[in-house]
Image: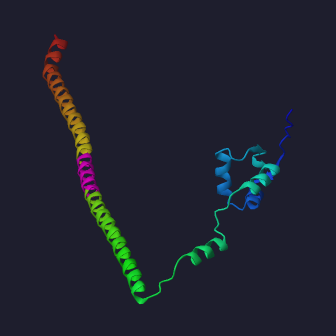
Amino acid sequence: MSTTTAKTFDLSRKDASEILKVSTRTLDRYIKSKKVSSKSIAGRIMLDREEITSKKKTRKHRKVKKSQVQSQVKSTPLPETKKEVFEINAALDQAAKAEEKVYKKLYDEMKVEVRTFQQRLEGANYRVGQLESEVKASVPLLDHQKVLTAAKKEKHNNKVLYILLGVILLLQPLWLLLAYL
């Protein structure tokens, strides 16, 4: 028969992070990955104090102990002759030069890549400028065509009115003659 204790969520994230000696961001990662259970109470995330204290006891620290470093230093043999020192320095210089070559190669590759991206961007900007000028030129042209068609319709309407007016004026003497007869 197992006895399960009810969890009491009474610890804030800040307090829990201080107990575990981690940042609140790391604690949030623990919560997200379900390493630590949490509960939202009144809009605040609360944690179980017993669970956090047990995590503190089982948590593995990444810090290296001073005794481990001292034992590594003691186990590394010191060079005894100038020749050994010279060989070590030469090896370090070669490693530094090799590392420098790698970084230079990476730098050159990135420089070429940036240059190609920059050229592509400049080409795209140039094309955008061309398209903008085409749009600017085409929109007023459409408006101008609307104005021209409206002017043509107006001229046509004016011609019809003038013709009707002329017909009426020509027929007026006939009406007068017909009215007196």
116 or 66, which lies in front?
Answer: 66
Q: Nearer the viewer, residue 43 or 129?
A: 43
- As displayed, is residue 175 above or below residue 145? above
Please tell me whether residue 127 belongs to the stretch shown in magenta: yes
Lateral position of residue 64 relative to residue 159, left or right: right
| Residue positioned 57% across, 77% down in the render | 73
In this picture, residue 35 sits left or right of residue 157? right
Q: Viewed as shown, does residue 151 lie left or right of 170?
A: right
> Which segment is the magenta one?
120-136
Residue 179 in the image: above or below residue 56:
above
| Residue 11 on image: x %, y % | 80, 52
In the image, residue 86 sits, relative to residue 45, either above or below, namely: below
Picture quadrant of residue 74: bottom right
48 is higher (above) or lower (below) than 108: above
For the stretch drawn in magenta, the main secondary structure is helix
Q: What is the residue that sits farthest to the top in this orientation?
A: 181
Q: Position of residue 135 (x, y in %)?
A: 26, 46
Residue 41, horizontal then vertical, whole percent: 79, 44
- Of 98 and 14, the residue lying toward us: 98
- In what quadrant of the picture does the N terminus appear? top right
Residue drawn at point x = 34 percent, y = 68 percent: 102
